[in-house]
Image (tube, grey):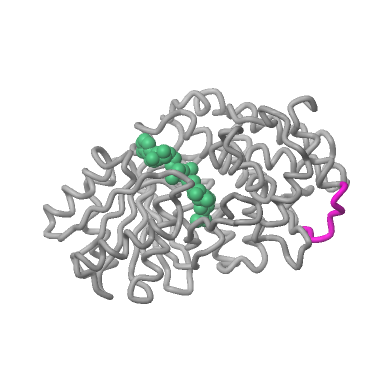
């Protein structure tokens, strides 16, 4: 068993990483919450499998559970989903000493976390991530939230409303990835690659050496990747819980990625959008001489070797992409805030000329590769 403790303003919490953990989670959850009553917010896709294991085990330990399935689709990650959890909490009589347990991927974790942050002005939450992306990224660090419709651009603003609400416990069991479609495994590998690029060259080497198996969804060797990727996220969120400095580095690829993720015709998962976003950010960084063209190529190679897209499947007008980026919540006073790879990791830049950003988008158009 690996256990990493994370310091946070709500109090320190443990990330426990072990196989075959879900059917033994009761004592660990009981150690952080003595209420014995919980809303189990579960991804519909894992209701019959991993959520059932957690539920059956907790019920056998005397917990009263209200099970609340959610369909994990990005367009449903809106306030109505949070209100549904509030209604379940009200019906179950969940009070301040009780708990929300999220079993699922990043969508379920973000929505359940926001419901926990707001129900009765904040109750405990335990994250049980079931996607690779949520194991190494979304479940850790306390960012919760939902998408918000933006009438002027006719699409959803990603994670525009939310709260910082750190979990009381995170339980990471890589056995839960056994049912995850390979495409979603690769999506999680994009965030692992992001963590490697911003802070851990040893993780980058490990990913490259394991790439063939990981990209094919063979996950026997995934545990050290998960541990190292979590260690990067932990170090960053401990340094900067509220995203005023170092934590922004975790947005590498995201300001570009958020502009393309909602475009339905591209049909991108979050991780795939981040992958293309990282390639665009690398092109931008190379254009500004923050990294060499060789480093730009090596980041692209890392992502491609993990089975991730490194360009758009069809041309998207650059003007449209620039407009979508201006709506990202990381834009400050109308100026884009970009995270770009640099020699020894990544840097945050507020001063990148729009022509450079436009060139970066040209570098990921299908005819550019
Ligand atoms: N809070 C944060 O710090 C943070 C960080 C990164 C991403 N996010 C958010 O996370 C979301 C993406 O998360 P995600 O990639 O986990 O996607 P997701 O939650 O959409 O899950 C991906 C798909 O896998 C299914 N699924 C989940 N676990 C499964 C399993 N074990 N077996 C079979 N199917 C399973 C889901 O039903 C869904 O269809 C985005 O909304 C993003 O904004 C949040």
Q: Give x and y (percent) for residue 246.
A: 66, 62
Give the answer, above or below, for where 242 lies relative to 56.
below
Using the rendered view, name the quadrant where residue 72 is placed: top left
Residue 223 is left or right of residue 327, and the answer is left
Residue 65 in view, yes or no: yes
Residue drawn at (81%, 44%) of the image: 284
Q: Residue at x 23, y 48 (%)?
A: 54
User: What's the residue at 34%, 54% (across, down)?
Assistant: 102
Left or right: residue 360 versus residue 226 is: right
Looking at the image, which is closer to me, 131 or 299? 131
Percent position of residue 174, x then y: 38, 39
Q: Nearer the viewer, residue 248 or 226?
A: 248
Closest to the observer: 168 or 75? 75
Residue 133 visible: no
25 relative to 49, above or below? below
Which quadrant does ligand 1 occupy?
top left
What residue is drawn where x is 64% and y is 61%?
329
Give the residues drawn in magenta, as a range.
349-355
Please identify the quarter of the rendering in which residue 73 is found: top left
Q: Is residue 7 left or right of residue 368?
A: left
Residue 337 falls within the magenta-colored stretch: no
Q: Is residue 226 left or right of residue 232?
A: left
Residue closer to the observer: 151 or 164: 151
Could you tell me residue 303's position as x and y percent? 64, 33
Q: Position of residue 214 (x, y in %)?
A: 50, 28
**Badge count:** 0
* Placement of the C terminus among the 4 image quadrants: top right
């Amino acid at each position: 068993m690996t256990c990493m403790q994370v310091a946070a303003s709500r109090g320190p919490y443990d990330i426990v990483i072990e196989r075959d953990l879900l059917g033994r989670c009761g004592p660990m959850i009981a150690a952080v919450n003595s209420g014995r009553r919980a809303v189990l917010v579960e991804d519909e896709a894992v209701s019959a499998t991993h959520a059932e294991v957690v539920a059956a085990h907790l019920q056998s330990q005397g917990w009263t559970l209200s099970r609340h399935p959610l369909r994990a689709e990005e367009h449903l990650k809106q306030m109505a989903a949070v209100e549904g959890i509030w209604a379940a909490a009200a019906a179950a009589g969940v009070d301040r000493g009780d708990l929300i347990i999220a079993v699922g991927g990043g969508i379920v974790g973000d929505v359940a976390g926001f419901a926990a942050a707001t129900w009765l002005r904040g109750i405990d939450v335990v994250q049980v991530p079931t996607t690779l992306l949520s194991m190494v990224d979304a479940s850790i660090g306390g960012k919760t939230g939902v998408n918000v419709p933006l009438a002027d651009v006719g699409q959803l603003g990603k994670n525009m409303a939310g709260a910082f609400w750190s979990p009381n416990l995170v339980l990471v069991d890589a056995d839960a990835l056994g049912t995850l479609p390979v495409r979603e495994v690769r999506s999680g590998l994009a965030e692992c690659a992001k963590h490697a690029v911003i802070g851990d060259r040893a993780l980058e080497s490990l990913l490259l050496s394991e790439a063939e198996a990981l990209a094919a969804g063979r996950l026997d060797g995934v545990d050290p990747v998960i541990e190292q990727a979590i260690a990067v996220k932990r170090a960053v969120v401990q340094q900067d819980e509220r995203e005023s400095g170092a934590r922004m580095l975790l947005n590498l690829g995201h300001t570009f990625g958020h502009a393309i993720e909602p475009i339905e015709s591209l049909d991108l998962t979050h991780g795939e959008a981040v992958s293309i976003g990282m390639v665009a950010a690398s092109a931008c960084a190379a254009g500004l001489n923050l990294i060499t063209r060789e480093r730009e190529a090596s980041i692209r190679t890392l992502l491609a070797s993990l089975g991730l897209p490194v360009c758009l499947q069809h041309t998207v007008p650059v003007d449209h992409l620039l407009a979508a980026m201006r709506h990202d919540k990381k834009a400050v006073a109308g100026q884009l805030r970009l995270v770009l790879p640099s020699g020894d990791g990544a840097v945050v830049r507020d001063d990148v000329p729009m022509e450079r950003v436009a060139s970066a988008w040209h570098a990921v158009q299908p005819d550019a590769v």
